[in-house]
Amino acid sequence: MNAAKDNPRVVFSPSGMRGRVRLGTQLDQAARDIGADLQSLCGGKGQCAKCRVRVLEGVPDDSGLTSCAAHLSAPTELEKKLFPAEDLHSGWRLACQAMVIGDVAVEVPDESRAGKQVICKAPGCQSVELDPTVRRHGLYPCLSGTSNSIGAWEEIARTMGPPAYSSPPLPDLPLLQILPPVGTDSSGSTTIVVRESVECIAVFKDPPSAITGVALDIGTTTLAAYLCDLETGAVLATASAVNPQVSLGEDVISRIAYANGCADGRRNLQKLVIESVNTMIEDLARQAGVSPACMLDMTCVGNTCMHHLFLGIDPSGLGRSPFIPVICRSLDFKARDLGIHIAAGALVHMLPVIAGFVGADSIGVLLALEPHNLDENVLVIDVGTNGEIVVGNHGRLICASCATGPALEGATLRHGMRAAPGAIERVRIDPVTLAVDVSIISGDTGSKKSALAVGICGSGIIDAMAQMFLVGVIGKNGNLNRRLDVPNMTRDKDGVPVFVLVPADQTATGREICITQDDVRAVQMAKGAIHAAVRILMKELNLSSFDRVLLSGAFGSRIDPASALAMGLFPYCPVERVRSVGNAAGDGARLALLSRKKRLEAARVARQVQYIELTDHPDFQREFALAMWLPHMRSSSLLPEF
């Protein structure tokens, strides 16, 4: 066997990331294996076309590697449809369609790089009566070996009997494994940490400065973790990351398909998220100056699919009607059994899920916002790849989920991208000249190129849709107004009508950034699903309006409420009553970390909330069709002012 031939080299430019891969490896998988920065939003299906690369011919550097187009498999039929013949001849390929069959170097253009996403996951200011499940029991004399002692643990256990506990808590195995032998140390003191008065989970020779826990929000697109002092409630550190599972599928449906359609798919997805969580734990430890061994509890929220994949549970039931989860109730597991690198005896508490696509993240939102304790009627929307909606008050709460797809987060659009440097995040259009003014997320380099646009993210596309509708670029039906005689309204090289936001000479890619008719339709579909779901829940409760609208989630916190109202993301409500509440799901996880009462409340609320399955509802298709119009077929003329 020729090791070099069977394991060709791959180089990604301009990052310089390189390595050997197995012969026949897909180029996008090679990027993941090597750690190269390459987008893959559709799980390798060729649907998003975000993984465009160009083969570099010849010897690209001093490594001696000779690269050519023939060192990748022949273009697929999908690529032949996507790329003009001259582009294929120039070496342009989709990384998810090309297999490595020889040494190759490829250029990854700006628009194909994943970049470092800007994630808004700052903790909220909710307070709670501290009642954590773990506590330090106190200080104990080191083991002296008294004559009537029958064991080191028994010597400690005698001091932990009544009145502190009805019976001494039992030891966790890793605790026993680090207890010193009797009589080996007669100086100092020992701290014992007890969980729920029933189990001793940690022992510290030197009392730790803080007993801490981690609240984790496992989002489809992003992850967030909060390190909290369990004795003061203070947030000591915050960490966030892109969920690495996006490399295997942008939405929950594609991840379910990967989990069931690929050998070791479920295990691969679980491994990716666990590794990322452990990296965030290391980051939290560095920020706060504490050891992961002092992280003694963890609470987790996430939608039902993320919940299942985090635990390694089969998610296939969520991919077909009637969308039944494997389990809904709250759960506790040892962190070590999941491979989470915190204290060996710590538990991971999973908050309950409500239904197939309304998960523990919605329970976290309810814990943080408490609509079940309010008299006023509240609409809560967690806007994301999967839209989760709750309506009601203390009298009755109902919820639903709608598959919005990734369009509202920038994916699937021609120039869509995540909220990373170079993304257009705000759009304003002059109503007279139709001149476009954009705000761009800046990078950290300070270079001129970092200030140029690369694409448009979710908040930008909502702004763009609202502005285009208000100034007449698109009509109520979403059709582009091709009769407009302005430079922005033009056609691309394929003759497709487009509205240009940023001309080619002002972008980082050298290509114009525009909105196509297909982009508008994708956003209409997403917003129509949310609007229709809200209308149905309003009918169920016999409501004509809301007292408040709360937009939650990392993406929801970036949406301009006026733009959301103008495009009809939800039924009309005075803009001053619409508020972004940040990462409420993560806040709920934090409250549950600090309070046993909140965990009991979570279980109670999960049983109380009524779930409405929209796919079975007789009115959904009609409401969806009406909601495709801007802002809605039946909407009043009331529109917000900008």
Image (cartoon, rainbow, N blue to C red):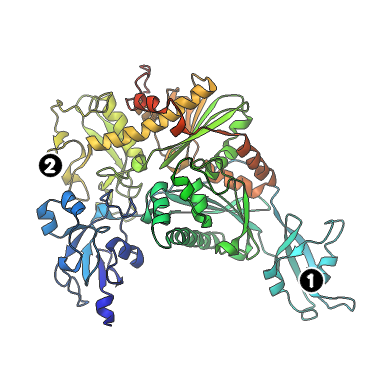
Viewer-proximal residue among 507 and 405: 405
Furthest-bottom residue in this view:
1
Q: Which residue in the structure is indicated by mark 1?
A: 153
- Choose top left, top right, bottom left or bottom right for residue 201: bottom right
Mark on residue 475? none
**Which kind of residue does numbered mark 2 sit on?**
Asp
Would you say residue 206 is visible in this rendering?
A: no
Quadrant of the rendering where the N terminus is positioned: bottom left
Viewer-proximal residue among 225 and 601: 601
Quadrant of the rendering where the C terminus is positioned: top left
Residue beneath the point at 67% across and 51% down: 232
Q: Which residue in the structure is indicated by mark 2?
A: 494
Task: Give the image location of residue 335, x and y in percent.
Answer: 60, 61
Residue 390 to residue 106: above or below: above
Looking at the image, residue 147 sits to the left or right of residue 351; the answer is right
Which type of secondary structure does the marked residue at label 1 adopt?
helix
Task: Give the image location of residue 91, x and y in percent.
Answer: 15, 60
